[in-house]
Image (cartoon, rainbow, N blue to C red):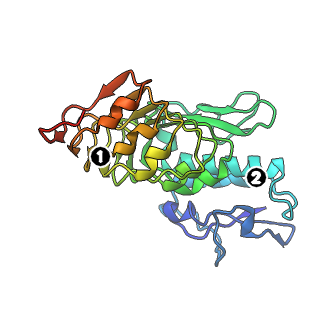
Amino acid sequence: MVCVPARNSLSELSKKWVVLIDNSREFPALAFPFLESGEFEMMDTSPGLVSIAAILSLLFLCSRVVLTDFQNEDTLNEVLAREEVGLAILYSATSGPSWQEKDGWLTGDACGPIPWYGISCDKLSRKVTAIDLSENNLAGTLPGEIFPLFLSLRRFNLAFNALNSIIPSTLFQLRSLEYVSLAFNQFDGTIPEIPGTLTILEELDLSCNSLSGTLPSSLYSSRALLVLNLYQNLLTGSINPLIDRLTNLRELRLYANTLAGTIPSSLGNLTLLSVLELSVNRYGTALAL
């Protein structure tokens, strides 16, 4: 069995990573939907060309990935293998060797009798249901290509780390998400749109980053939201009167941004709201509340 990445740089490994060749049979890249077809080359492991984290992850994949009948891509073994691929990419992209806690990572089953640190799994299917690596010294960027691999992920918490760049839009394409916290990192760019297919998201915390732009209009359709924390960012624009569509909202924290305009009176329609923090913004003097 031979691992064959497309390029030597870690950033490109994460996009076009591995194809397995076993007994002279080449398995198609469509085994992993985030891989693109193209030319592949043998990895040169000369010093300096590939990071230690990338080599470790690649060796892990060579020993762990179980390829089954490619005419049925949805078999359980295939799903579990893809999830471990995603976790290995996450490890490499976020300085895994420097994490404070990494017990079990890249050894054994991610959802074995003792799951990898920060990983929770369904007891019956052994699919990953939660990733909680908060306060764990993660640094680098969040690889967006991993999220289509976690079809049962309900909770995703990477708060209190040193992650930067943009928040991948693919994160919010997971229909199973109930809780997301990327608070207290260094993310920039805009808040991704939240598709209408994500109907059970209850808590979203993106506070204490450097996010800019306006609140996405799709946010107001997330009717299951109970908690929305976006404070201490660089958000602009105004609060849309459609905020009252979030009928289940209990906590709303938007303070310490650069929001302007007036505070919509429709906020008063949120009868379950118990926490409202909107201070330190640039609202006009005429408030509609």
In the image, residue 32 sits, relative to residue 203, either above or below, namely below
Q: Is residue 56 visible?
A: no
SS label for mark 2: loop
Q: Quadrant of the C terminus?
A: top left
Q: Residue lying farthest top?
A: 274
Q: Name the residue rendered at 28%, 39% in the picture.
A: 264
Which residue shows up at 76% across the image and 28% down it? 113
Q: Residue furthest left?
A: 285
Sort mark 1 into few (<14), some (14-19) or many (20+) by Cα contacts within 10 Å.
Answer: many
Across and down, in percent, residue 243 comes to 39, 40
Numbered label tally: 2
Task: Classify residue 184 as left or right of residue 153.
Answer: left
Q: Is residue 257 left or right of residue 140?
A: left
**Residue 158 percent across, percent down from the top left:** 47, 37
* Residue linked to disc 1: 210
Looking at the picture, tell me which residue is in the foreground, 68 or 101: 68
- Is 62 in front, or is 33? 33
Place of residue 268 in the rendered image (x, y in percent of width and height, measured from the top left): 34, 29
Q: Nearer the viewer, residue 46 or 132?
A: 132
Q: Is residue 97 visible?
A: yes
Of tags 1 and 2, the one toward the viewer is 1
Label 2 packing within 10 angstroms: few (<14), some (14-19), many (20+): some
**Amino acid under disc 2:** Val
Give the residue drawn at x 54%, y 67%: 8
Amino acid of disc 1 = Ser
**Camera-side residue: 29 or 167?**
167
Residue on which disc 2 sits: 65
Q: In which quadrant will I find the N terminus?
A: bottom right
CA gap, disc 1 and disc 2? 37 Å
Q: Quadrant of residue 239?
A: top left
> Furthest-bottom residue in view?
39
